[in-house]
Image (cartoon, rainbow, N blue to C red):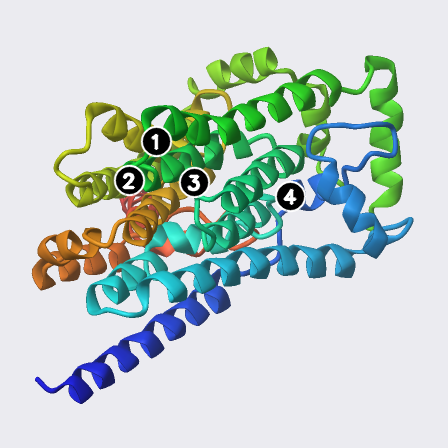
């Protein structure tokens, strides 16, 4: 095959990646649910609180009252920031070769990516955007490390999930990039951003709590600020501690509805996560030690571990899948030999199998959409209902 023919094929694949990316946005970027829309109104009017930074900045746009149109617009802008930042990272990292483009196709056609697009209004999208953009810088240089420190710290103040979501991954990214440096320098560069995130998390946890007697007044303030009916499940976040969340999840795990959610959404996402862990371990240099492998597995699974204390099976599982893809990108950017190993692993049969399975599976829409009802495995619920009705 001539060089010109190869480039023509690559160009068509690049166009296909952009098209499926756009289709995912059109299908799943729907209005936010009441919970995420309400949390966007949290600000620092009564002092520093968890998840209040973004709302404090959004007040310059909202003004004294946040209308439905303003919240919808702000939610869409958040999502587009995260999604287009991710596309820029993919284009800069994966678009030069065939197997990189195959990884990009698997990412943007993944049912997990569709779930991420469908998390409209959630602050996760801002975190994703910041991490994707900072990955364009060199994680071994002082400037890149400084930017990562800023991102993880600001991210924790936006949403404390930044710590398990991306702080561990950023440490992994630095660790892999600095594999040829002296042990002391490698450890220092790796630990500093994570320790900075821990300090920010401690500050948010300790000082981001409203006094109990001010909580009712703050909830009234949020309700007055909103041009819509706020979700009480969102404002109750202000009253719950980590211990409260643990107790809440102990009750929730006993409910059949939650168990069904874990099975129908959690298992497909976990299987995709395991595949990405396998792929990343295969791409690693052969002389990578156990510590590198352990850190890699931990970084990818860290978001899923949040199911112990919180309710969002789809958000956490899809973020783990995303980090699996980001880890592939990080390996390709940090080690020139990684692409050769990727070419040996991503054969056409394997690519087709993963692509088709991703096209055949759906998970719950987090926003107001419910497209999952007629896709596998959620279609099983509809089928069981039909069988039950026909038997009566």
At horizontal 74% and vertical 36% (from top left) the residue drawn is 52
Image coordinates for residue 258, horizontal then vertical, percent: 43, 29
First along the sequence among labels 3 and 2: 2
Q: Which mark is residue 273?
A: 2
**Residue 221 visible in this rendered orientation of the protein:** yes
In the image, is 14 to the left or to the right of 354?
right
Of the two numbered discs 1 and 2 on the same chain, state the one appearing first in sequence. Answer: 2
Q: CA distance from mark 3 to mark 4?
A: 14 Å
Along the polypeptide, which appears first: circle 3 or circle 4? 4
Instruction: State the separation of the CA atoms marked 3 and 1.
Output: 13 Å
* Closer to us: 223 or 127: 127
Pointer 4 residue:
36
Q: Are marks 3 and 4 in contact (CB under 8 Å)?
A: no
How far apart marks 4 and 2 lie (CA) works out to 25 Å
Between 145 and 131, the one lying in front of the other is 145
Instruction: Say which label, 4 or 2, has the lower sequence index.
Output: 4
Query: Which residue carries the number 1 mark?
Result: 301
Asked if residue 228 can be seen in this view, the reply is no
Q: Residues within 10 Å of mark 4 (few under 14, many from 20)?
A: many
Residue 153 picture location, percent across and down: 61, 34
> Foreground mark, 3 or 1?
1
- Mark 1 touching mark 2, by CB under 8 A? yes
Q: Residues within 10 Å of mark 1 (few under 14, many from 20)?
A: many
Query: Residue 130: x percent and y percent?
Result: 56, 49
**At 73% across and 54% down in the image, what residue appears?**
71
Where disc 4 sits, the SS reads helix
As displayed, is residue 81 above or below residue 289?
below
Which one is earlier in the sequence, the residue at label 3 or at label 1? 1
């Amino acid at each position: 095959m001539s060089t010109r023919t190869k480039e023509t094929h690559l160009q068509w694949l690049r166009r296909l990646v952009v098209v499926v990316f756009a289709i995912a946005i059109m299908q799943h970027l729907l209005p936010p649910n009441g919970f995420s829309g309400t949390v966007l109104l949290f600000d620092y009017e009564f002092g520093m609180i968890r998840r209040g930074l973004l709302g404090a900045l959004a007040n310059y746009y909202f003004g004294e009252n946040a209308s439905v149109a303003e919240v919808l617009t702000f939610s869409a802008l958040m999502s587009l920031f995260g999604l287009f930042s991710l596309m820029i990272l993919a284009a800069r990292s994966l678009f030069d070769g065939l197997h990189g483009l195959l990884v990009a196709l698997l990412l943007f056609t993944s049912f997990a990516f569709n779930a991420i697009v469908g998390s409209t209004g959630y602050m996760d999208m801002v975190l994703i955007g910041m991490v994707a953009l900072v990955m364009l810088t060199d994680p071994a240089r002082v400037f890149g490390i400084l930017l990562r420190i800023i991102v993880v710290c600001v991210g924790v103040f936006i949403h404390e999930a930044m710590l398990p979501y991306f702080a561990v991954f950023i440490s992994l990214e630095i660790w892999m990039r600095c594999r040829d440096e002296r042990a002391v320098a490698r450890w220092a560069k790796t630990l500093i951003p994570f320790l900075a995130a821990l300090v920010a998390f401690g500050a948010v946890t300790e000082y981001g709590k409203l006094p109990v007697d001010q909580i009712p007044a703050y909830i009234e303030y949020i309700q007055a600020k909103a041009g819509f009916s706020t979700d009480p499940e969102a404002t109750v976040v202000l009253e719950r501690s980590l211990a409260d969340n643990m107790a809440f999840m102990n009750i929730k795990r006993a409910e059949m509805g939650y168990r069904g959610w874990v099975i129908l959404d959690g298992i497909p996402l976990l299987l995709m996560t395991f595949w990405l862990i396998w792929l990343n371990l295969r791409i690693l240099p052969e002389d990578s030690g156990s510590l590198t492998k352990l850190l890699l597995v931990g970084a990818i699974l860290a978001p899923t571990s949040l199911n112990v204390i919180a309710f969002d099976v789809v958000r956490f599982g899809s973020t783990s899948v995303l980090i699996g893809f980001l880890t592939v990108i990080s390996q390709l950017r940090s080690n020139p030999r990684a692409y050769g190993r990727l070419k040996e692993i991503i054969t056409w049969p394997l690519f087709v199998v993963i692509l088709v399975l991703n096209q055949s599976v759906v998970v719950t829409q987090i926003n107001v959409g419910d497209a999952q009802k007629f896709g596998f495995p959620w279609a099983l619920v509809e089928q069981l209902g039909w069988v039950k009705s026909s038997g009566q």
